[in-house]
Image (cartoon, coloured by chain):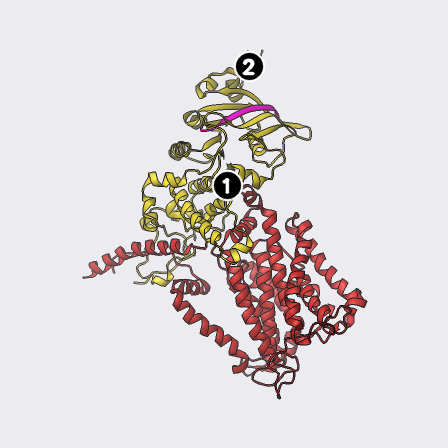
Amino acid sequence: MSTTPHDPAAGSEHGDQHLGTDEELVTSDTMPEEFLPDGGVIETVAVDVADLHPELADAEQVAELVAPDRTIRAKVGEPLLQMQQVTMKFGGLTALDDVTFDIRRGEILGLIGPNGAGKTTCFNTMTGVYRPTTGQVVFDGRPLGRTKRNEITRLGIARTFQNIRLFSDMTALENVVVGTDARHRTSVPGAIFRSRRHRAEERDALDRGMALLEFVGIGRRATQQARNLPYGDQRRLEIARALATEPKLLCLDEPAAGFNPAEKEDLKGLIRKIRDDGYTVLLIEHDMRLVMGVTDRVVVLEFGRKIAEGLPAEVSADPAVIAAYLGVPDDATA
Amino acid sequence: MSTETTSTVAHLGIGDRFRLWWDALARPTQWAVGVPFIVLIALLPIIKPPVLTTVGTDFAGVLAQFGMYALLAIGLNVVVGQAGLLDLGYVGFYAIGAYTVGLLTSPDSPWNQTDSWLSQKWAWLFALPIAIAITAISGLILGSPTLRLRGDYLAIVTLGFGEIVRLLADNLTTITGGGRGLSRIAYPIVGVSESRPTGYFSAGNNQAPITSGVAWFWLSIVLIIVVLLVVGNLQRSRVGRAWVAIREDEDAAEIMGVPTFKFKLWAFLIGASIGGLSGALYAGQVQFVIPTTFNIINSTLFLVAVVLGGQGNKLGVILGAFVIVYLPNFFLGRTELFGIPINGNEIANYKYLFFGLALIVLLIFRPQGLFPARQKLLAYGREVYVAARRAALALTRPTSDETTGGSR
């Protein structure tokens, strides 16, 4: 019997439909050893992480490896990030109007609002993509001012993107390692001469990278190219990459977009797991059930203004929030 | 056989198969295969294989030129292939490297140092690091304002830079000699003997077996290996990952903590110094520089070598450089090929037409280049890939056990 080689993606609309179960991944009994994966040509091979590092099989040890190792000035429960009267204008459009709220260390804060309410703008002012027109963002006791975006990441704010923006040509592991590089300092001379620090950092990057992939549940996809991952795994990989920068604050921009209810349930678990591991989480989300189920507090924006803030239960009972989301009945305005 | 197995993994080109075979070899085996292969390449101009040897020009000279183009392709590949910065004026760095050596060591130049304190014997070797340093600085000067631009805008600015360098060389007649160029540039004086009164590297050395071309070819092979090691180390480090991240999505890279501007500048600087190194080699080999060598067509040709070979793949672009240099020279002066009469000179004259057509065809059917390879970006990634290999094997073995069990 001869197996005919064929393009795995041929005739399918999505490359990832071929992934299926593990057993289907590699099934050629005639494949000589030398044609087996090495560096991502054959993308569909799963890595057994326990095979690589025995400790990665133990969830608790993984969590420990992933836990951030850094000093945060704010104590648990104290404000980690403060939005102080932030106004953001684009020409005549006021996207954020005098928005003030705190994110406290150790909590999961939900930021919700209808489309166009200014959630993502709010996010972008925090991460340095935009500079506020007036007001300021204070992070861990330090006003962000004109800090560069990559420095803000190194200060400890990491984010994911609403529309996935992975480095699609890199493998999953390499994507995460780019994140760990934010904490590394090797530059060109160190890399050329393979300095001691370079070698130590590369080791650390590999260990932490694998642990992070395992933490978000995609460890076995380490050697696959990011563009070939299924959609849900790409979202998870984005979270792993953001966590790799060892943030004090992790900002998730609509992480559940395009997820089915079961995947949303898994994501909820992951977000809680991240918080329990010592991270503070800011969650932008449309799905009210997810927000209400996972957050500790919620801030509601509408037309660039903060209209409510409080516990999920309080907020969802707030008439202003209900009006913003469901619209006010005609007879109420009459 | 009863079991129906479907292969979801094949679809390998020749290049892929070769790479997988190579990667699967143990390190000592790789050395055992690699070193004799390089030695064989190095001996080509001495062996002079029948069909391969060029007719119209000195085969060794062609290979020496290939060595320089290979260096250029490796350097340009850092900028274009790895960091994704389209540089159309790369020839500018080549020119600066060549002219630095020329200005320091040619008797025609006002800044000639060989009369006063620098002996002619060591002049080239002394000028080499200076040429590399000056091109690196010129890379910084070009990069620091222009690397804030992206994509097409960067391409236009670098195109202008290449032309500026050429026009300066053409018009600063008191310094560069203008269109007359600089002649009698220094070269390394090694192995002076009765039969070779000017040493191995002199352009006048045509004593077989080690002619001037062979000597320069060997020197460039050594330099290529050194540069490949440097570039390879960079690629499998934070720097290489930053470059690829910038190429893939610059904004996302910045937000993930990559100091994008700094690493783009590094890419430019490293690319420029390799270009300068190649330029210095060129100046030493032909002992003569004129501005027309550094025109825009040549700049495009370097880019063709990179695109043809496969952007991002260091070894691929070397093959690309080989195609660019060797093919026109292969046809030059040839009147018949395998018994078929051809007009080789005409074919060689139309080389730009053929390269243009080849590029269009390539970009339609194989946009990733002839020898694409996904570069490895982890210094200790091998163990992960070994684990992947093990996992794959573990999955294949039960299947084969079943089939053998079933057939008994």
Residue A286 in picture, x, y percent from top left? 49, 29
Residue range (magenta): A97-107
Q: Chain of mark 1?
A: A
Residue A71: give x, y in percent of width and height. Answer: 47, 35
Residue B370 visible within the image? no
* Residue A74 visible in rendering: yes
Q: Residue at x 60, y 60 (%)?
A: B76
Q: Amino acid at mark 2?
A: Asp
Label 2: chain? A
Camera-nearest residue between B113 and A307: B113
| Residue A330 marker | 2
- Residue B194 in the figure: left or right of residue A201: right
Q: Tag 1: Cα neighbours inside 10 Å, few (<14), some, or many (≥20)?
A: some
Can you give x and y, in whole percent of width and height, for residue B348 in the image? 64, 74
| Residue situated in front as seen by the camera: B126 or B273 | B126
Pointer 1 with pointer 2, Cβ within 8 A: no
